[in-house]
Amino acid sequence: MKKKNLMEFMKRVIAGFVKEGRLGTAHVYQSTYNRILDFMGGRPMDFAELTPSWLKAFQNYLLSRQLQWNSISTYMRMLRAVYFRAVDQGLVSAWPRLFHGVYTGTRVTVKRAIDVEVLRRLQKPLPEHTGLEKARMLFLLLFMLRGIPFVDIVFLRRCDLEGNILTYRRRKTGAWLTVRVEPEAMKLIQALRCNDLESPYLFPFIHCRGKDEYRQYQLALRRFNHSLKQLSYILDNKVSLSSYSARHSWATIANFRDYQQELISNAMGHSSVKVTETYFQRHSDERIHAMNRGVLSFVFSR
């Protein structure tokens, strides 16, 4: 590897994620690599070319390809992470505020959290829609396990569940989480768990072990989201369920119930409260008005 070659260094980082089994993360970094390669016209890029003006030009290129701001932010953050890795390894000198002029934030563009009433309606079985019954139960289980990501539940192993304690490592961040499985969640686990005792996995999403397991996960995710779309139509045309909805809903409801945001962040395995805040649904005007009334009453009422 050329010491100053950004592209070769990115390949090494991606290969490291693949070796660790973090295939989803590797996929995002690979997409970033492909975008940079397209922008550079297929030629290699050295770290010396990574300047504020280059980053601005790259951002404009992504905008010209009709990418959303959240997608642009993802590419910039992945590139920034690669740059910091190179700095840590002494390949390049640190450039303060190098990424200051490009967008690296997160815009909440879609309401992913669903209302409490919808969750309560999902508790009712769907005997007339047997094909969607497992999707309904799985969605509720994702919610009951503190909004566990779909990818993590797919790769849960039997040994991860001991009694009513579930311990697992997040595929995305590597953070370890311990969840106490409540009785209503345990019933769903028993109904959905894998019947193949030779399988190491708790749930029957991976059928061919050791063979394209990440692709099997992607197929299971597409099927799950397709079923949730059908389930949304049955519940209410205004309801939009997805694999993300359970996670966002758990965070939003916990926030509305006035649990500390740091506590919610720890429960979800986020690296910081700032990440968790992107999950929260905005409070309604009525709740804000009531809060103001409460503040004024506290201060001025005798």
Image: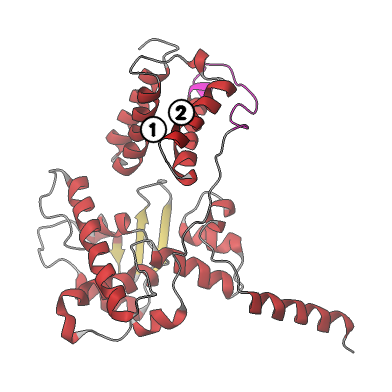
Going by the numbered disc 2, the residue's amino acid type is: Val
C-beta proximity under 8 Å, tags 1 and 2: yes
Q: Is residue 13 visible?
A: yes
The residue that mark 1 highlights is: 32
Check the picture and name the quadrant holding the N terminus: top left
Q: Work out whether 201 lies above or below 35.
A: below
The residue that mark 2 highlights is: 82
Q: Is residue 111 magenta?
A: no
Residue drawn at (39%, 79%), measured in percent from left and top?
119
Tell me the element at label 1.
helix
Please tell me which residue lies in front, 252 or 180: 252
* Res. 112 image quadrant: bottom left
Going by the numbered disc 1, the residue's amino acid type is: Thr
* Res. 243 image quadrant: bottom left
Residue drawn at (44%, 72%), measured in percent from left and top?
114
Q: Is residue 91 visible?
A: no
Q: Is residue 92 magenta?
A: yes
Q: Is residue 199 left or right of residue 180?
A: left
